[in-house]
Image (cartoon, rainbow, N blue to C red):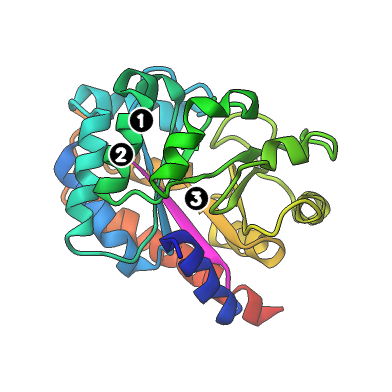
Amino acid sequence: MSRIAARFKALRKENRGALITFLEAWDPDPATSMSLLRGMPGAGADLIEIGCPFTDPMADGPTIQLAAKRALAAGGSMTHTLAMVRDFRREDSTTPIILMGYLNPILSYEPARFCTDAAAAGVDGLIVVDLPPEEAALLAPHAAARGLDIIRLIAPTTDADRLPVVLDGSSGFVYYVSITGVTGTRTASAEELAEAIPLIRRFTHLPIAIGFGVRTPHKAAEAVRVADAAVVASALIDTLANSLDEQGRAGPDTVRRVLDQVRALAHGVHAARSLT
């Protein structure tokens, strides 16, 4: 059983949702980024997404675009991202790690070699934002051969005819993009989520995670009452960015501030179903 499947199975037994947190590799520097990665499980993150720095993150709003820009300025690359995961795995063998990024860096790395190196580093799943199902053969066979989950994105505009196509070959969990637009902009209402998630469940038994626009413990709790996980990204990156000095360097409280926010989010997520 994969780490992702094992984590969701354990959470189902506890009747609680998952908190999936995000960080951009090498934002704002390798040491701070690594400290955040190491600290997130203890602060309450159940799964962790790591953003792979890229020059054109088309699905991301200004917050994560700036994070990618800082990471690239610090020298971050796909190779460095995989090295972070290898270092993390020396201390944590159970927390699922998902890489989230775009196809171009994977093609530059070469898909088969990338999947081999990602699996060897300890990566569990891949979210490739701009890889449509029709072009999945570029990556999916290599990922499957190395035990990497391909996690597909479902949008509010994905209808019942399109859902089976998008979900074909999906594994790990399904990522529901709860808004039309880029990350970190608006949030979906509880009513919108309650309408959308049952439709997706008609076509898959995989866990469903809600992301894009989940910013507070309250919204994260709303997400796990109707789905299986809440993904929080831009809100954490905003906290990091607000802690940087005028030169964009991490402050003495950068890591603490972000991890304190993870703890608050985890409290909201982990208590959500006990309050219903």
Indicate the position of residue 130 as horizontal and vertical percent values.
54, 25
**Height in image: 178 above or below 135?**
below
Q: Earlier in the sequence, mark 3 or mark 1?
A: 1
Q: Is residue 116 left or right of residue 143?
A: left
How far, Cα to Cα, is label 2 from label 3?
28 Å
Residue that label 1 marks: 112
Please identify, in this view, whether the residue under mark 3 or under mark 1 is nearer the observer. 1
Residue 78 image-quadrant placement:
top left
Percent coordinates x, y for residue 190 in the rendering: 75, 56
Q: Quadrant of residue 246?
A: top left
Residues marked 3 and 1 touching at CB (< 8 Å): no
Residue 265 visible in the picture: yes
Q: Secondary structure at mark 3?
A: strand
Q: Is residue 138 above or below residue 41?
A: above
Identity, as a three-letter code, of the amino acid under mark 1? Ala
Which mark's residue is nearer the viewer, 2 or 3? 2
The answer to whether residue 225 is magenta is no
Q: Are marks 2 and 3 in contact (CB under 8 Å)?
A: no
Q: How far apart in space, not on screen, are marks 3 and 1 (Cα)? A: 30 Å
Name the residue beneath numbered marker 3: 232
Residue at image mark 2: 116
Disc 2 marks a residue whose amino acid type is: Thr
Q: Which residues are magenta?
A: 16-24
Q: Residue at x 30, y 23 (%)?
A: 109
Give SS at disc 2. Answer: helix
How far across and down, in percent of the image, does residue 214 sit? 58, 49
Instruction: Describe residue 224's horizontal placement relative to residue 5 as left or right.
Output: right
Q: Nearer the viewer, residue 111 or 213?
A: 111
Q: Nearer the viewer, residue 12 or 168?
A: 168
Indicate the position of residue 95 as horizontal and vertical percent values. 36, 63
The quadrant the C terminus occupies is bottom right
Identify the amino acid type marked 3.
Answer: Val
